[in-house]
Amino acid sequence: QVQLVESGGGLVQPGGSLRLSCAASGFTLDYYAITWFRQAPGKEREGVSCITSNDGTTYYADSVKGRFTISRDNAKKTVYLEMNSLKPEDTAVYYCEVDKPYCSGYILGVSLYDSWGQGTQVTVSS
């Protein structure tokens, strides 16, 4: 079965950094894009980033552009989200999900496969 496992979250001070990992199994990661989204209590789901399956084109929400970097290592079947200059408003549960090869779901703001992991908590606080 398709399975995604997020890890790497934790408590960090404002201005700090974290690297999240999304480990994929049960499907060929090479053929799919991976989207990161986040959700905080009382807030709507927010798409954060996406990386395409083939040419590695990346997309970022305006709120994280210049601070976050998405990357993928297909050999390790893992996608990463490097988060720098973290702000309290970045506090949320972060999820990775399967997307169509060219990040169609991310671009449209919808989940196309409804396949994501358990999430990892990121808390940015002094």
Image (cartoon, rainbow, N blue to C red):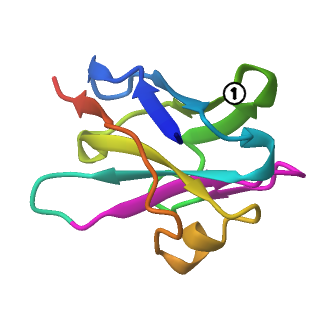
In the picture, measured across the screen, residue 54 lies left or right of residue 7, that is: right
Q: How many marks?
A: 1
**Residue 56 covered by magenta stretch:** yes
Up/down of 104 relative to 117, above or below: below
In the picture, measured across the screen, residue 73 lies left or right of residue 79, that is: right
Q: Quadrant of the C terminus?
A: top left
Q: Locate residue 6: give its quadrant.
A: top left
Q: Which residue is mark 1?
A: 77
Q: Locate residue 117: give its quadrant.
A: top left
Using the image as rendered, state which of residue 71 and residue 88 is in the foreground: 71
Q: Position of residue 119 (x, y in %)?
A: 33, 37
In the picture, measured across the screen, residue 84 lies left or right of residue 118, that is: right
Label 1 secondary element: loop
Which residue does the image show at 68% across and 64% down from the upper left?
100
Up/down of 15 relative to 2, above or below: above
Where are the magenta residues, as a range?
A: 44-59
Q: Position of residue 34 (x, y in %)?
A: 62, 49
